[in-house]
């Protein structure tokens, strides 16, 4: 089949995907356009989560479990998985976040840090959408300093562990089925991971109200009060924060792809609007200053696609390091912030309402800019690679 390339992919990077990957991308694009785009503005305005048809539909398309041996629906590349994140965010950044939490964080933690038995037990159930997962790392008083600053504690008690503490900003943490909770072992002080059912006694979660970004995703405050977790639910290969960071390295690169998709969402809205909006007797797309905004936006998008394509190729090659995914996330989210502002500006007053397509991308950019490592922290990761010196404190 002929793949309908995006005008915003100005240099044709999509053409580097294999035919089967392109077919899967077409199917995803059609699903998002028919199922997600028609409801996204209304859900965003009300602050409500997608219906179960979105979760199940993504599973039916094979979007969950793309990277893991137990659930891999077909042979695919990290570059393809990046394009999946881009396509999701191009329609709605919350959809990209839903997949990022389920696929990259919850499944990724189990895939990378779980035993063979844990992988076999949990990954297929998450890939099929039987279960919805969450990832509980960030805390009310611990974000960028999670490596040393975690306050949630796990104490061994025979064949079980007892967890006490709190988490914040946990996507799907109040509406899912399981949450991977990261906690410090009271005995050795090392960070360990635990698969915690959300209906476990002592697990209490409430959605965070009043968000101005990614309003469709339900982020939760979680309190853990003497939550008992069997040893069988401790991720057997998560023995320090280094293992947690390995999960974040992979998801950070996909957030970079999502940032490009969110930029494209605003760019496409601006191009369509400026061709139709008549001022001074002609479409504003024919005005020089408007064309400058569009050209600068396309430049940001094109350079970002080039960067994320290469960082995903490095993952396929086995050469991607923390510094590579950190630079990708820092660069693309910074360029995204510029791009969504320019595109919103191109719509004038209509740019601040949801109807014309740019405002949701403009607002959602703030969350993408901040999570999976702030710009400052990613800058310092890259700076350490450049100089050989850590400057985190």
Image (tube, rainbow, N blue to C red):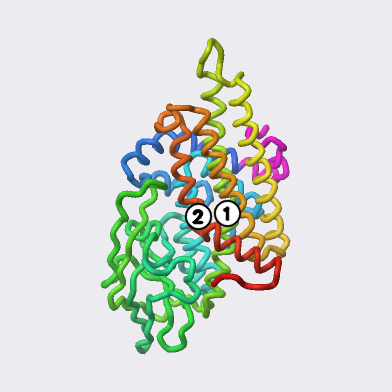
Query: 285 or 308: which is nearer to us?
Result: 285
Q: Position of residue 229 (x, y in %)?
A: 36, 77
Q: Is residue 109 visible?
A: yes
Q: Position of residue 95 (x, y in %)?
A: 46, 46
Q: Earlier in the sequence, mark 1 or mark 2?
A: 2
Residue 59 left/right relative to 173: right
How far across and down, in percent of the image, does residue 317 sit? 73, 61
Answer with left or right where residue 304 lies relative to residue 48. Answer: right
Residue with the mark numbered 1? 254
Label number found at residue 44:
none
The answer to whether residue 93 is left or right of residue 336 is left
Q: Residue, x 71% and y 55% (percent of image)? A: 313
Quadrant of the snapshot with the C terminus: bottom right
Q: Residue 134: horizontal and vertical position, in percent?
A: 41, 61
Q: Badge 2 is on which residue?
A: 100
Mark 1–mark 2 distance (CA, rounded to whole Å): 8 Å
Q: At 54% from the left edge and 25% from the top edge, which residue is drawn?
A: 272
Residue 304 lies in magenta, yes or no? no
Q: Secondary structure at mark 2?
A: helix
Give yes or no for residue 6 being in the magenta stretch: yes
Residue 166 position by quadrant:
bottom left
Magenta residues? 2-23
SS of the residue at dot 1?
A: helix
- Residue at 55% x, 60% y is 376
> What residue is drawn where x is 48% and y is 52%?
99
């Amino acid at each position: 089949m002929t793949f309908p390339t995006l005008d915003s992919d100005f240099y044709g990077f999509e053409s580097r995907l294999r035919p089967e990957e392109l077919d899967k991308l077409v199917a995803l694009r059609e699903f998002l356009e028919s199922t997600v785009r028609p409801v996204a503005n209304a859900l965003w305005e009300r602050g409500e989560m997608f219906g179960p048809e979105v979760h199940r539909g993504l599973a039916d398309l094979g979007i969950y479990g793309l990277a893991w041996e137990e659930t891999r629906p077909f042979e695919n590349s990290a570059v393809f998985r990046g394009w999946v994140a881009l396509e999701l965010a191009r329609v709605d950044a919350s959809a990209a976040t839903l997949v990022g939490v389920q696929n990259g964080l919850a499944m990724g933690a189990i895939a990378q840090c779980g035993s063979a038995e844990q992988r076999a037990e949990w990954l297929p159930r998450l890939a099929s959408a039987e279960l919805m997962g969450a990832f509980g790392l960030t805390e009310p008083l611990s974000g960028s300093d999670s490596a040393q600053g975690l306050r949630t504690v796990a104490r061994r008690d025979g064949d079980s562990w007892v967890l006490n503490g709190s988490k914040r900003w946990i996507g799907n943490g109040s509406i899912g089925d399981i949450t991977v909770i990261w906690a410090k072992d009271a005995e050795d002080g090392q960070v360990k991971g635990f698969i915690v059912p959300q209906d476990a006694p002592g697990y209490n979660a409430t959605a965070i109200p009043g968000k101005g970004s990614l309003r469709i995703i339900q982020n939760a405050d979680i309190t853990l009060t003497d939550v008992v977790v069997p040893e069988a639910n401790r991720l057997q290969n998560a023995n320090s924060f280094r293992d947690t960071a390995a999960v974040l390295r992979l998801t950070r690169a996909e957030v970079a792809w999502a940032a490009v998709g969110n930029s494209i969402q605003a760019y496409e809205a601006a191009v369509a609007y400026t061709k139709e909006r008549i001022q001074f007797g002609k479409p504003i797309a024919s005005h020089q200053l408007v064309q400058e905004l569009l050209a600068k936006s396309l430049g940001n998008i094109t350079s970002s696609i080039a960067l994320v394509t290469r960082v995903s190729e490095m993952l396929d090659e086995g050469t991607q390091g923390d510094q590579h995914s950190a630079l990708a996330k820092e660069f693309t989210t910074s360029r995204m912030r510029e791009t969504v502002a320019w595109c919103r500006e191109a719509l004038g007053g209509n740019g601040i309402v949801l109807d014309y397509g740019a405002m949701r991308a403009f607002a959602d950019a703030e969350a993408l800019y901040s999570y999976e490592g702030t710009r400052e922290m990613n800058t310092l990761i890259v700076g350490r690679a450049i100089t050989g010196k850590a400057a985190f404190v």
